[in-house]
Every structure is written in structure tokens, then in C-alpha cells.
């Protein structure tokens, strides 16, 4: 319950989204951010697992590329983070390996018990959606004491779903190394590094592990929570508002910008493309041939427009207490053509539901979405 309160003002259905969209200009600016193409990372296969000690000096990491430096969760709308954060990854059939580097002159952490609310400290967070369906996803948080808060979400909070905090990432290997001294305001640190081996079996839906393969695509994102603090009595104390005396809002720095202050829009996460080649030997295509890569781009572009329609339907519903089947009432931008191909929209609605199908007229590939964000491949329609 305490965890959910972090998001109450942002995710009770679409209240947080819609509060930013009262004027058309603000709506378009927000939807521009929400429909930008997420970042992608090619994760290479390793035959030798890294030693999980938090130091990132294992030879296996040597040729592995870093992600882009993290930005603010809202992207270019906010200033760049004052401390660098970046991630690198590897995989084998048993684990997804994650290494993170967090610059910080004052490394601190006080939470010590598993499944306490770790983001009340500065922390590093991993979000994984192996199915890429914007539901049934996993979150793992860690602080500089290596305390873990792990949870499973059947649906995003905006659908009225809660988190299953009782879920544990069984078999997780994790370690933290502090480049400096922990909880000591009297010196300056360089930062801290995190290493995780996340078991594939623990983040699988159903009875069989969802073992990745060369060419597989997952959705993933990373978040860093950073609080403003002062040194008082030899401890780090969160800076407070002078009127309410509550802690100032935390900074949220992420790999692939969300577009709004909410990590629980899984469709906004980055693409994790699995390569079957070792790091340093493969290209950026992640083992996907040119044709498959082009098809992936076209599919994701189609889905991205459906997500814009989904957002606009909810904006319309709040204003009119009903969804609409008239696309002109929304309207979704660039709906007639995508990547040079003609597309066709079919839209049906009732007061409380809608279902939209967007078909690429050239390829015949069609995707559908409903009011709950259930997005699915509808097959080929001509």
C-alpha cells in the first residue's frame, strides 16, 4: 500500500496523464513525448558468466558496450541529470546479466530489509517485460546496501491493478561496490556500481522458462531515484519543503525516457534485442537479418500509433464520459500513412469500451488495442 501511494497522483486510471492535457497544445506536447521511439540495446551472448561481485572489472565485461547515459524521465522537457548513470548487459540461457554504474559524490543507504520500500533511499531499478505486451512485468530495486525490493505486476497500475510484492526473484545474484565510503558525509565518493544475474526462470510467465534466443526482443527500462539531501548529525537527511516540511520530490533518471513521471507505462520502455554473437564480434542488428529488422520497425511503428489512439481515447473519455468511434474526434496524427505505407483504421466503441484495429495496407499486418491497453497481433487482413 505504501508503495502504491508513490503513484497515486499519477496513475489512478489516467488522472495524472490527463491533468497535463487540458489544452490542445499541452496534449500534443505530452503525446509527442509519449509516442517517441524508445531506445534500443543489443545484448550479446556470453559463454562465460561474469563473477557477480559488484566491481564490473571481470574480463567478460571488457568488450560490452554501455547504454546511453540516463536522462530525466520526462526526456528533454527537464534538465539533464547532474550525475552519470549507464548500464551494460549480457545473457545466456540461464541469466540476464546487468551491470550499472552510478556516479554520486555522496553514496548512502539505510534500508536493510528485503521488500521494504527501497526507493525511499537512492536506488537503481530494473523493469522487464519479456512478453512485450505492456503487462505481466517485473521490477527489481536495489540500494547501495544491496537491499532488494522485487515485485510482479499483472497489469499496469492505471488499469486498477496492484503489485504482487510477495513475488521474489528466486535465484537472483546481486552485489554492490561503493567507490568511496558508504554513509559518510565527511568525504566525497565517486559513486557505486551494481551487478545482477537475473534468472530467466524467475521472470518467466507460465510453467516453462521463456528462454531468449538470437533475434528475440524484450522490453526493458532502468530507473535511478536520487534524493536531495543535507548532512545533519553525521547522517544524510532528505531536504524538505519549507512550507509542508515534506521531502522534496526525488529525481527520476532513466535509460529510455518515459515522457511523463511514471515508470508504469511499459509500452514506453526500451527494446532489448538479443544477439547470439559474443560482445565485440557482432553488429548492432542483434542477430536479426535485415528483413526481420525492417518488419520489427514497421510493426512497432504501427503499435506506436495505436498507443497514441489509446491515450487520446482516454483523454476523450474523461472529457465526455464515453469513448468514441469517430477518429476525427481524437484525432491521431499521421494515421493515414506510416513509413510510406498506407494504413487503415477500424474503430468501434461503447460508453465504457473501445477496440481499434490498425492495418498496414501494404503488408496486410494488423494490430488491435482495447481500452485496457491489451495490444495484440490480429494477423493479416486484406
Image: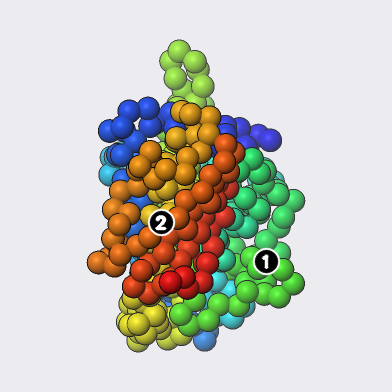
Q: Residues within 10 Å of mark 1 (few under 14, many from 20)?
A: few
Q: Is residue 6 visible?
A: no
Ranked by sequence position, the earlier of labels 2 and 1 is 1
Relative side of 67 to 243, left or right:
left
Q: Position of residue 352 (x, y in %)?
A: 59, 38
Number of numbered discs overlaid on the protein picture: 2
Q: Position of residue 304 (x, y in %)?
A: 40, 56
Residue at 61% across / 32% down in the picture?
5
Q: Is residue 322 visible?
A: yes
Which quarter of the figure has residue 197? bottom right
Of 361 and 247, which appears nearest the observer?
A: 361
Q: Extreme left residue here?
A: 340
Q: Position of residue 23 (x, y in %)?
A: 32, 28
For residue 168, which numbered disc appears in the image? none
Q: Residues within 10 Å of mark 2 (few under 14, many from 20)?
A: some
For residue 205, which numbered disc appears in the image? 1
Which quarter of the figure has residue 306? bottom left
Which quarter of the figure has residue 275? bottom left
Residue placed under numbered mark 2 in the picture:
345
Mark 2 falls on what kind of element? strand
Residue at 46% across / 70% down in the picture?
381
Vertical order, 367 against 60 (above or below)? above
Amino acid at each position: 500500500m505504501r508503495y502504491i501511494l508513490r503513484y497515486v497522483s499519477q496513475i489512478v486510471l489516467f488522472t495524472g496523464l490527463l491533468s497535463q492535457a487540458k489544452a490542445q497544445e499541452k496534449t500534443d506536447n505530452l503525446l509527442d513525448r509519449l509516442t517517441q521511439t524508445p531506445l534500443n540495446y543489443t545484448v550479446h551472448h556470453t559463454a562465460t558468466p561474469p563473477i557477480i561481485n559488484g566491481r564490473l572489472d571481470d574480463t567478460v565485461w571488457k568488450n560490452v558496450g554501455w547504454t546511453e547515459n540516463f536522462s530525466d524521465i520526462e526526456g528533454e522537457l527537464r534538465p539533464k541529470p547532474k550525475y552519470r548513470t549507464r548500464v551494460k548487459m549480457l545473457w545466456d540461457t540461464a541469466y540476464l546479466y546487468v551491470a550499472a554504474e552510478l556516479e554520486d559524490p555522496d553514496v548512502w543507504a539505510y534500508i536493510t530489509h528485503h521488500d521494504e520500500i527501497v526507493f525511499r533511499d537512492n536506488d537503481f531499478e530494473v523493469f522487464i517485460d519479456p512478453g512485450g505486451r505492456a503487462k505481466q512485468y517485473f521490477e527489481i530495486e536495489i540500494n547501495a546496501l544491496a537491499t532488494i525490493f522485487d515485485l510482479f505486476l499483472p497489469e499496469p497500475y492505471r488499469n486498477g491493478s496492484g503489485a504482487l510484492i510477495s513475488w521474489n526473484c528466486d535465484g537472483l545474484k546481486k552485489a554492490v561496490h561503493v567507490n568511496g565510503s558508504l554513509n559518510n558525509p565527511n568525504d566525497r565518493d565517486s559513486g557505486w556500481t551494481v551487478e545482477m544475474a537475473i534468472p530467466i526462470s524467475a521472470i518467466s510467465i507460465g510453467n516453462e522458462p521463456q528462454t531468449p534466443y538470437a533475434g528475440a526482443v524484450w522490453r526493458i527500462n532502468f530507473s535511478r531515484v536520487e534524493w536531495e539531501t543535507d548532512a545533519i548529525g553525521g547522517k544524510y537527511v532528505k531536504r524538505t519543503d519549507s512550507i509542508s516540511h515534506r521531502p522534496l520530490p526525488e529525481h527520476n533518471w532513466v535509460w529510455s525516457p518515459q515522457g511523463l513521471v511514471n515508470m508504469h507505462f511499459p509500452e514506453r520502455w526500451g527494446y532489448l534485442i538479443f544477439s547470439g554473437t559474443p560482445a565485440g564480434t557482432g553488429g548492432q542488428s542483434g542477430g536479426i537479418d535485415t528483413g526481420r529488422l525492417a518488419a520489427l520497425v514497421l510493426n512497432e511503428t504501427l503499435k506506436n500509433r495505436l498507443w497514441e489512439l489509446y491515450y487520446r481515447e482516454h483523454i476523450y473519455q474523461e472529457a465526455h464520459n464515453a469513448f468514441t468511434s469517430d477518429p476525427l474526434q481524437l484525432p491521431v496524427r499521421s494515421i493515414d500513412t506510416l513509413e510510406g505505407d498506407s494504413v487503415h483504421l477500424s474503430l468501434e466503441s461503447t460508453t465504457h469500451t473501445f477496440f481499434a484495429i490498425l492495418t498496414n495496407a501494404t503488408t496486410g499486418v494488423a494490430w488491435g488495442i482495447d481500452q485496457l491497453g491489451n495490444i495484440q497481433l490480429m494477423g493479416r487482413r486484406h
